[in-house]
Amino acid sequence: MPALRSFLITGWLCFLVSCSSETEKLRSIGEAYVGPGTLEMREDVSLRSKVTATVKHGERLDVLATRRNFVRVRNGGGTSGWVNAKNLLSTQQMKDLAATINDALRLPSQGRAIVYDVLNMHTEPNRQSPSPFQIPPNGSVEVVAHLLTPRLPYQAVIPSIVTQQKAVPKKPKKKPKKGKGKEEQREEKSDVPPPPMPQPPKPPENWQELSKTDLDDDKPQRKQDDWTLVRTADKKAGWVLTRMLAMAVPDDVLQYAEGKRIMAYFPLGEVQDEDKKKNHWVWATLAHPMQSYDYDGIRVFIYNVKRHRYETAFRDNTVRGFYPILTMPVEVVENKKTLTAPGFSTITEDDEGQRWQRTYAFLGYRVRLVKKEPVAKPVEKAPTNGVPTAAPLTPEKRGWLDRLKALFSK
């Protein structure tokens, strides 16, 4: 029995030593999160290699190594494999995605849109960014924001992953023993990966002006993409290409679009036409795509019960409008009486760059301007491209003796 017990203890210790050595070989150098809905981990970087595991969106992964555009990761179950870096999200990108979803759930809807085919919802307004969610064919979404961006290559998260690597204590170097060859000396070297390269300095803010030459006027303009932020009924949100959406406006009103893209629409009450109910509508359209503003025209349709058709009650095609368009009850004085009528408000910009919020009241078959007041432009967040921003400087603390010397020096 003592011999058997010592044999089992020796075997168990050998097993623990082998496990510890394997753990040191696969030491984590950072963390990342799964971007797409599902992602396959493979034994090697080749797409023909065997799939080791399948992970889902938002799952945390340990980063073990990098090779060009590929990253070796390990899931919570201890299985490791290689994935493409463009399918991973950093910790900051996960926070930005959560903030985008919260904003999309909070922003007012600008109308319901439908899709005719499967449509990917991206985490960022970029064609190559991860798409964790999908809209099924004939699915509907709520439009909440609009953005025009240049078509740029997507930046993978490898630099941001490396900056988050954990501090690994250095092991003391072992002097090679005499009589050992080069092969045995290589095996004694540590498997801890070398420290990452430092990030390059950020370019100046006016780098485009500094690099501009007289020949730049002859260069073709960079291609741009028109994006729309949408949300689904199950509280998911993401960016989709605007041209893939179709606003769900009734066909008897859609025929008056005149080739313009409908950017927002709202009902303004309803009337009874025999056995059918018809709504009055207000919509915003964009005549020319790829503009910095959201719409350039406002139009109000009323349904004429006697003629059984829609007619225009208000139109303005000389605006530069921005989201959001809001509908609300409006108090208006009519014939020395204060009435509450359905209304809507728009945000437009004049030639001097000042934005104004105009509030209109819908009185039967008339549209009346009730209020006009200036509004401030929203603060746009500058893209960081994964480069961490510097922390704000804190004032230096000085004692009473230093302050007294400074006072006498003045």
Image (spheres, helix red, strand yellow):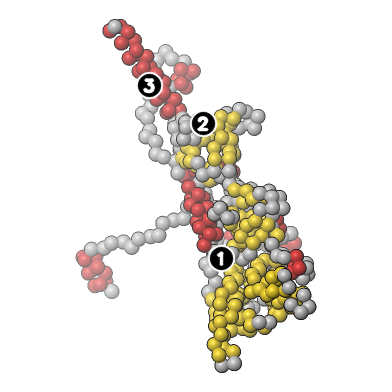
Residue located beneath label 3 in the image: 16
Residue 320 at x, y percent in the picture: 65, 73
In terms of image quadrants, where is residue 207?
A: bottom right
Q: Earlier in the sequence, mark 2 or mark 1?
A: 2
Badge 3 marks a residue whose secondary structure is: helix
Residue located beneath label 2 in the image: 80
Residue located beneath label 1 in the image: 108
Task: Say what amino acid the circle numbered 2 marks.
Answer: Ser
Residue that lies at the very extreme toward the front in this rendered image: 275
Q: Earlier in the sequence, mark 3 or mark 1?
A: 3
**Residues under labels 2 and 1: Cα distance?**
43 Å
Badge 1 marks a residue whose secondary structure is: loop
Task: Say what amino acid the circle numbered 3 marks.
Answer: Leu
**Taking 270 as reference, is 395 left or right?**
left
Task: Say what amino acid the circle numbered 1 marks.
Answer: Pro
**What's the residue at 60%, 71% (across, down)?**
325
Residue that lies at the very extreme toward the bottom in this rendered image: 336
